[in-house]
Image (cartoon, rainbow, N blue to C red):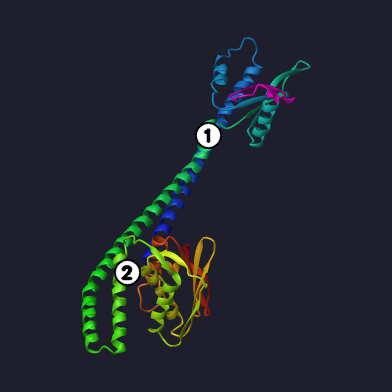
């Protein structure tokens, strides 16, 4: 399984766990809030009954318990309204000094929309007969501050869970990336070290052959290949360090890569140059950046099965240098535009899938530029773009 696939699985698992925790929390909190809301409703019914008893009491009635119930409500906002809509009393509500009556009526309408209303029938005398139907008051109430806080708590908890998941994902990605970096740096430096001895030996043998066969062109080409091996070893040795970029003429660098590859690939591969007519100087580590161009060109050659056209173009705007490498190969599906730069991704039967990943690291980490698939069409070709600061 690829490292990228494992990281995706970890992220999916973390997200699923977060969703389960959040959903469970919301369900439990909803049940709790519903139970508390019913409890507050019961309290208000008791309070309303105490209010009815207080309004219907005569002069001889003992109202100590009733008053204790009425005064015991210190949390639930209450407004008492008579049958004509006039405010009789209110409790646990901060009322502004100006337009207090209007403010209270707005509160009454708000409470009524939530169905927080209890009607109390009052005793009245009609033709000497007591009746509880002729007169009444309405008690409007709102949820207590504690209940409102509990209602918002699940969303706060959900936010905390999401933050936890994001931190966990970031930690996993950081640890995986750090582990990959250590492996790559160790492998690169060890590769450079192992190549050093045979390359030195080959260089010595080439010099011996040159002294005996000075006019042989093949020996000269062998020398160029050995020098290329020395350059490759130098590139591997620089992985993990921060090489210092130097001013470099870009057109010359690109021409060196094209000249080297054109002699070592199929004669059916054609390279085309589309440069500006002026020298373009960019701060680069030339050996590493040549590696990027080589990788892109070799991938293009592989995608064309050894036959086709590679166009390297250079453009400039006010702040950037734009390098496009286009081919007439198999193309890339749009869904894979980002995946091609992930370590281990490859469509070849042989290969580690590290070329584009290393190219991305060299361009973005060492040269603070960008590399991406500009466009691609299946069975027609692809264009990779590199953006560098001027």
Q: Does residue 36 appear in the picture of this structure?
A: no
Quarter holding the N terminus?
bottom left
The vertical placement of 324 against 32, above or below, is below
**Mark 2 and mark 1: Cα distance apart in space:** 65 Å
The residue range painted magenta reads: 82-101
Would you say the magenta stretch is mainly helix, strand or loop? loop
Left/right of residue 292 with respect to residue 99 in the rendered view: left
User: Which residue is depicted at the point 66% across and 34% down?
Assistant: 110
Mark 1, residues whose alpha carbon is within 10 Å: few (<14), some, or many (≥20)? some
Percent coordinates x, y for residue 191 in the rendering: 26, 70
Left/right of residue 259 with respect to residue 230 in the rendered view: right
The vertical placement of 245 against 102, above or below, is below
The vertical placement of 295 against 81, above or below, is below
The vertical placement of 368 against 251, above or below, is above
Q: Which mark is residue 147?
A: 1
User: Which residue is depicted at the point 29% across and 63% down?
Assistant: 185
Mark 2, residues whose alpha carbon is within 10 Å: few (<14), some, or many (≥20)? many
Percent coordinates x, y for residue 247 in the rendering: 41, 64
> Mark 2, mark 1: which one is toward the viewer?
2
Q: Which mark is residue 87?
A: none
Which residue is disc 2 drawn over? 235
The reply to whether the magenta stretch includes residue 64 is no
Residue 104 picture quarter: top right
Q: Secondary structure at mark 2?
A: helix
Q: Earlier in the sequence, mark 2 or mark 1?
A: 1
Percent coordinates x, y for residue 22 in the rendering: 47, 48
Q: Secondary structure at mark 1?
A: helix
Work out which residue is located at the far right of the displayed protein and give it: 127
Percent coordinates x, y for residue 262 in the rendering: 41, 83
């Amino acid at each position: 399984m690829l490292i990228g696939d494992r990281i995706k699985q970890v992220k999916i698992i973390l997200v699923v766990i977060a969703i389960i925790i959040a959903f469970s929390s919301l369900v439990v909190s909803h049940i709790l809030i519903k139970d508390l809301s019913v409890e507050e409703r019961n309290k208000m019914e008791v309070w309303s009954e105490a209010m009815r008893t207080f309004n219907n009491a005569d002069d001889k009635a003992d109202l100590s318990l009733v008053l204790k119930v009425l005064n015991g409500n210190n949390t639930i906002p209450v407004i008492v309204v008579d049958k004509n809509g006039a405010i009789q009393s209110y409790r646990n509500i901060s009322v502004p000094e100006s337009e207090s009556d209007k403010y209270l009526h707005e509160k009454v309408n708000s409470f009524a929309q939530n169905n927080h209303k209890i009607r109390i029938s009052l005793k009245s005398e009609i033709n000497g007969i007591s009746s509880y139907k002729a007169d009444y008051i309405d008690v409007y109430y709102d949820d207590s501050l504690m209940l409102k806080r509990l209602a918002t708590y699940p969303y706060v908890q959900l936010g905390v869970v999401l933050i936890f998941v994001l931190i966990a994902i970031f930690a996993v990605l950081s640890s995986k990336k750090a582990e990959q970096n250590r492996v790559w740096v160790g492998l690169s430096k060890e590769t450079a070290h192992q190549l050093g001895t045979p390359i030195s030996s080959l260089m010595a043998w080439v010099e011996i052959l040159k002294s005996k066969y000075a006019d042989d062109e093949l020996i000269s080409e062998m020398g160029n290949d050995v020098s290329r091996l020395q350059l490759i070893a130098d590139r591997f040795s620089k992985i993990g360090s921060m090489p210092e970029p130097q001013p470099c003429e870009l057109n010359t660098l690109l021409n060196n890569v094209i000249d080297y590859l054109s002699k070592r690939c199929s004669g059916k591969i054609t390279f085309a140059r589309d440069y500006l007519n002026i020298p373009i100087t960019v701060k680069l580590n030339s050996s590493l950046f040549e590696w990027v161009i080589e990788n892109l060109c070799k991938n293009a050659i592989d995608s064309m099965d050894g036959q086709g056209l590679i166009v390297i173009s250079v453009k400039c705007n006010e702040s950037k240098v734009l390098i496009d490498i286009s081919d007439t190969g198999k193309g890339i599906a749009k869904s894979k535009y980002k995946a091609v730069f992930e370590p281990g991704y490859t469509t070849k039967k042989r290969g580690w899938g590290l070329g584009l990943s290393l190219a991305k690291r060299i361009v973005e980490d060492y040269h603070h530029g960008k590399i991406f698939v500009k466009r691609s069409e299946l069975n027609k070709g692809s264009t990779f773009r590199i953006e560098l600061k001027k």
